[in-house]
Each structure stands twice: as structure tokens, then as C-alpha cells.
Image (cartoon, coloured by chain):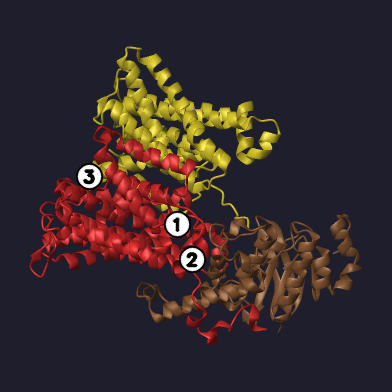
Amino acid sequence: MAFLEVKNISIQFGGLTAVGGLDFKVEEGQVVSIIGPNGAGKTTIFNILTGIYQPQEGEIYFQGERIDGIAPQKIVMAGIARTFQNIRLFPDMRVIENVLVGTHIQTKYKLLDGFLRTRRFRKEESEKIQFAVKLLKEVGLSGRINDYADNLPYGEQRKLEIARAIATGAKLLLLDEPAAGMNPKESEELRQFILQLKKQGYTILLIEHDMNVVMNLSDYIYVVDYGKKIAEGLPQEIQGNKQVAAAYLGESEVEL
Amino acid sequence: MILQQIFNGLALGMAYALIAVGYSLVFGILRLVNFSHGSVYAFGAHMVILFVGYNFGLAPAILLGVVLTGLLGILIDKMALSPLRKKKSPGISSLITTIGISYIIQNLLMMAFGSEKKTFPELFPNKMITIASAQVSSMQIIMFIASVILLLILTALVKFTKIGLAMRSVEQNEMISSLMGINTNFIIAFTFFLGGASAAIASILISGYYQIVYPTMGFVVGLKAFAAAVLGGIGIFHGSIVGGLVIGVAEAIAASLFGSAYRDSIAFIILILVLVIRPTGLFGKKGIEKV
Amino acid sequence: MEHITDKFNVEALVYKYRYPLGAGFLLLLLALPYLGLSQYVMRIIIMIGIYTMLALGLNILTGYTGLVSLGHSGFFAIGAYVTAILMLKLQFNFITSVLAAILITGICGFLLGLPTLRLTGTYLSIVTLGFAEIVKMIIMNWEPVTNGTLGLRNIPRPTFLGFSLTLANNGMYYLMLLLLLIITAFCITIQKSKLGRALHAIKENELAASMMGIYTARYKILAFILSAVITGLAGGYYATLVSYIDHNSFTFDVSVLILSIVILGGMGTIRGMYFGAVILIVFPEIARPLMEWRFVVYGLVLIFMMRFRPQGILGWRSALPFQIPAEKEAGQKRSGKHGISRG
């Protein structure tokens, strides 16, 4: 069984099918992209994977464990973390505090430890802070540790969101349009950054419109439209696919 | 006996519905629960006794009271809420602001009129009419009919007039309405005016029924009307009417069964139950959170 | 830390001298009864202490978590009534009674926290308001226990080892100080731990918080419980201080005053709670002619702060660097266990 395996998931909102009978899988250590026109249901797939929505049909397995229908928090603990299309940082917290919130599930001490300032509390707090500093250095935000999240420029906010997801201890990162709104230089930096994550052993599921990022980064690509898979394959296969071009250009007669 | 309570409840309940519509109007447009609505209600009745005190005569006093209360609604929006909208302040800010407004109005009334209970003039010579085994006062009938008429007028205004169309479009999307050439500031002000004026009319009817006014009178009635609005589904007109009637009848029956000390608690209990079990109310639609 | 003091910066100065300043402040508080202040002034100072505790309690909910409660007079009342009833009718001592009061307000906090599973914003605030009104109605109508509208009289003062604490022997003052210090330490702990970060994250973006693995519902209920417990503790103390309580001691005005203190001082801060309580309790006493305007002023405080300084007078984003502990304290063994650098 694959690292992440999604079998035949469907969800409807008020009679409208957002995702219908979708299958896909992600192997460990790969970068897999989901592409498709706006409104194709890509973010809905992420919302199902992270437990925000419950699929009405289908099954999802992560590392062999079934994860559909369980609480979002349990999914994070199982090792899946995400970023958001419309960035959702904690704006009134510092950059380092955002990352520390990410370490929440890795932090085990109890409230009483804090009140009594036990060794355990001090040791664990100190560990997490050191870890956060190190992580921020690696993503290139070491100069921003003390800043408040909403003072960061756009590209750095995206990076911080990824750092925060990494801090949960996740092995699978779901990145929702990380290059949106970036200039070519920034998106190239982002591509390098994701590549670096891949080298370090992270598995990445990516939703992205920037084809430069998608085609140069992905090990495998799924194309969805109207909540259904219309194509899948290696980047070069997708590039030559007529259906995909049709979906993007909005031709009406597309054979599914 | 039970029939008597139902009649009492229906009359008051219809007036609650009229206040509840004020919550619904403002909520519909701004997604804001106007916490100060209860004290606006109290303001209405106090303006009437003020002008009656200056020998304006009852009808002009009522008219002035209603108009002034409507203007108070606009004032609240212009002075306190509209600046917050411009700043795009979080929802918690407007909530706290309306709490502050409510508190200021209530305490200014207390300083101007004293906190004791004052008599409100009789609106009509009171006669008792017997229907089946129950006694119904002419004031109760007038309260019921006047509220029904006003609710119909308000509904017609929103449904069939040009300004009503504009209100509904602002409700759907303020920015696009503004791009379509609708003066959204005027529509919002007009909505606050309607909310204030309808609260004042309800206030006059209820005060005419009990013949008592006091500065804190809006606190409990405001919560009851809010309960009515929520029960029916806030933002939905006919929901507010059903909600108002249910609350009115329930409290009349509770008062006769457990004693008048428990009259007010029933509305709170209904409110909490509705909010916890079905926050969208009886007729409300469930929204999907966009992620 | 040298670079902070490069330019004149009050925050940095206060931070640099925080230990001597804190010790000085504590010494002042301890010595206060011996400075020859009148009993009237001491009473006001004790009221400031009580309202600081109440504000610290509400702050956990409104300041840290972003949930506005209009029903804290209800918790205050429950704390006071449980303490008074146990001391008066069952002759329990103060500590046992207050512990029972804390337990019961904690349970009520849990119950009132349950609606947060489905409600936010104004709806939640109105449920809390309804809760306080129901508490008041129970107090007024459950005569055998609460003595109805007549209230409870002659609530005894706390005694420890046969020594009775009074206003005259300053025992009540020191008890207030002790409770206040414990509550303050507790709040600092929350702020500086993962609990505080989780609550703050919920306030900032609830969905993102749950995507970090934070059980947002549980944490919101926990915030309700902690907030209720602190408020109940203050209520228990208040009952023995004034020795007479009735339903009029716990009106909506009390809830609004507590909220005003939190907003004025600065939501989410601890210094702000002290500051707000001092201002709003002292002001009607100094401005006697304005006494009847005080409620209007509380309302104006809410409106003006929301419009011009929603973060509160003492609320600001700290310009001090985040405190990073020295590397040696961190266990080297575990730090590389997860995260980006594992590959």
C-alpha cells in the first residue's frame, strides 16, 4: 500500500458534487501535484484529507491506517500537516511563536509543570524554542524570529506557514498554492525550497497553478476538473495531454 | 384559564416580534447582533413620556418618539459602528461597542428620568371583552393588530419596494451593491432607522399595556425579542413572528404555572436551548464554512 | 541584551530592571497597611485587588481566547454564595468553603463552556448573559438556601488557627494580596506555556489552530473553567469581606465593569488588568460629583477603546526580542528527533 492512498472519495454540498469518486496515491518521498482549473475541487480534497470535511463515500489510508472520518487533530498527529491557499497565520503572534504553536502536539508537559516551573517544563520549553530557531534558520527566516507574523512580506508568510506545518512533526505536507502571488524569482526560490524538503525526506502533496513549479518539481501529477480525475501521469505526459489543455482553456466538449 | 394565557401571550408575543424584526434587519445587512437594541427600545417609551410631560399631546408625542428613536438608531451606527466597519475591525469590536452603547443609553435614561418606575399614559380607554371563557382587554387587541399591521408594512417594504430591493442586495453583497450604484451608507442608515422606529412602536404598545416605564425596561424585553429572533432564525422575518409568538405564549403559561417570578426565565431557557441545539433557528439555513 | 538599551526605551528599561522593580512593588504592597492610610482607602485598595482578580479571570477568556463573556457576575455570585452558605449554614471554615466554591464554579464554567462547541461571537456572549440572569433568578427564588431577596447576613470572616482576619488587623488585606499573587502567577504561567499559545492561536485563527493539532473545543472549555474558577475564588473572598450579599451585588453592571477593565487595560495582558482596575475603581471615588456618571463612563470606555485603541492602554506589541534560552539547557539528544533537519 502506498504512503497515502485515496480510494473513491466523494463529497457533495447541497446536491452539487465537489469531489466525485476520486482515486489517487502518493508514494513516500515523492512530490505529487494536483492541478486543475479554479473551482475544480482541489482545496476540497485537502479539506477532506485534513478532516475538515468528512467524505460521504470512499476511504483514505495514510501509512496503512485509515484516516477518513477521524478528527482533524488526530490526522495531524498521524503526520499530515497543511498550509492554506489564503494564508492563515496567527497574525498577532511572533514568527517564532507561530512555529511554537506548530510544536503543540510534540509538547508533552502539563499545566502544573508550568506552574511549579519543573525541570521537565523548562527543559521541554527550551528544547522547542531551540528547535524553532533552528527550523526558522533553515527556511531562511532567521532574521525574522522576533517579527510579528503580519509584518512579513507575502513570500515569507508562505514560508512561515510551511515551517509551522513542519513543526508539527508531519511527514506528509499538503501545500495549497504556495506560489500564488509570487514573482518568478520568489517562485523559483520556493521551488528550490520544496526540493530541499524532498531531499530531507518529506513527502509533499502540492496544489499549484504555477506550471514552472509543478512541471519541474513533481514526480507525478493528477489533473482534476469538476471534482473528477481527468488525467494522471508524469510531468511530460501531462504536458502533452489534450484533455488537460482543454480543461484549462475551457473547451466545452471534453470527453471524460 | 389556559386560553386566557394564550391570549395574553399572543398579544405580547406579537410585540416581541416587532422588536425581533429590528435585530433581524440589522443582522441581515451587517451580520451584527445589535446588542443596544433593548436600550433603544427603552429610549422610545421615555421620549413619549417626555413629550407628553411637555403637553405635546399623545399623538404628536408618539410620532416624535418614534422618529427620534429611529434617528437614535442612525446615530448609533454613524457614531460608533460605521467607523469600525471602515477600519475593518474584528467582530469582537462591534460586539463590545454595542454593549457600551446599550449601557450608555440605559444609564443616561436613568440620570435624566430617575431609575424608578413611571406611569405611561393610557393609549385607549381600556375595555374588557370576553372571548369564550377568556377576558381580553382592548389594549391587548390593539397591540396585536398594530404589530401585525406594522410587520406587514415592513415585509412589504422589504419585498416590494425599490429601497427594499436595495436592502436585500446590500444584504447579499455590500461591495457589489455599492458598485451597482446603490448608496449603501444610506441603506444601512435607513435600516437602523427602521430598526429603531419599530422598537419604539413596540415599546409604546407594551408600555401602553403595562402603563409602566423605567430605564432598564429594555434589558429583559430586548433579550426576549432576541430569543424570538434566534428561535425563528435571525435575519428571517416570518421566523421572528413565530419566535415572538412562541416566547410570548410560553412565558404567559410559565407564569401561570410556576408563578410570575419565573416569567422571565422561560425566555432565557428557550434562548439557550435554541442556541445550543439549533443556532440557526427554526427557519434558518445552515451555511457551509468556506475554507 | 545590550542592543536594546541603545536608544531610550521604557519597555526595555522596565525589562532590564524587572527584578528590582518587581521586588520594590511587592515590598510596597506588603508595607501598604503601615503607611498610615485610612480604613476607607484600604477598603478601596482591597476592592481594586478584587476587581484585578476578576479581570485576570475574564482575561483568560476574552483576552487570551477571544470569547466575550457577559456573565461573569454569575460566576462571581456562585463563588460568593457557595462560600457564604457553607460558612453560615454548615459552619465550614473559609478554606474548605472556598475550595468547594471553586469546584462548583469550575463545574458551572464547564457547563457554560459546552455551547462553545457550536457557538461563537455574540451568540456565545448572549448565552453567558442568560446564564448570569438565571443565576440571579435562582438566588432570588431559592429561598430556603439563598434566603431569597433578603440576602445573606453576618457571613463570618476567615479564621486561621484561631486568628480572625479583619479589615482592622489588615488580615483581609494580606489575604487579598496572597490570592492576587497566586492568580497572577497562574496567569503568567498560562501565558508562557503551550496552553497560552494554544489559546492565543485559537483567538487568532481557529481553523489554523485545529490544523496544528490543537483540540480547540477542549481548550475553549478549559479556558471557561479556568476563568470561572478564578472568578469564583474572588467571589468567595468578596463574600467574607463584605459579610452581606444579596442578588443586587451581582448585576449586569458587575459584568460590564469587569469587561471594561479588561478592555481598558489591554486584552491579553496582565499589567493591563492591574492598571484598568486601579483606574476604573478609583475614578468614581476621586470624582465624587461624577459618581452618577460612572456607568456612562464605563460604556464610553468600551466604545472609545474599540474605536481608537482596541489593544488597550497598556496593550502593545513588545519590541523586546523573544527570549531564547541558552543552548545548554536543551537536551541535545532529542532536539534533532523531528523536523526539517532529520534527513
* Residue designated by label 1: C11
Q: Can the viewer see residue C40 in this picture?
A: yes
Q: Are marks 3 and 2 in contact (CB under 8 Å)?
A: no
Disc 3: host chain: C
Q: Amino acid at mark 2?
A: Ala
Q: x%, y% of residue A128?
A: 52, 76
Instruction: Identify the mark nearer the N-term, 1 or 2.
Output: 1
Marks 1 and 2 share the same chain: yes
Q: Are marks 1 and 2 in contact (CB under 8 Å)?
A: no
Q: Nearer the viewer, mark 1 or mark 2?
A: 1
Residue furthest left in the image? C162
Query: How many numbered discs?
Result: 3
Colour chain A appears in: brown
* Residue designated by label 3: C248
Q: Residue at x 60, y 38 (%)?
A: B171
* Residue designated by label 2: C198
Q: x%, y% of residue C276?
A: 35, 49
Instruction: Identify the mark nearer the N-term, 3 or 2.
Output: 2
Measure how far apart labels 1 and 3 are at the Cα level. Answer: 42 Å
Q: Looking at the figure, which quarter contains the N terminus of chain B?
A: top left
Horizontal arrangement in the rendering, residue B123 relative to residue B226 (left or right): left
Which one is nearer the viewer's eye here, B155 or C6? C6
Q: Looking at the figure, which quarter contains the C terminus of chain B?
A: bottom right
Disc 1: host chain: C
Colour chain B appears in: yellow
Q: Can the viewer see residue B281 in this picture?
A: no
Q: Nearer the viewer, mark 1 or mark 3?
A: 1
Chain rendered red = C
- Callout 2 crowding tier (Cα within 10 Å): few <14, some 14–19, many ≥20: many
Q: Is residue B276 above or below residue B227?
A: below
Q: Amino acid at mark 3?
A: Asn
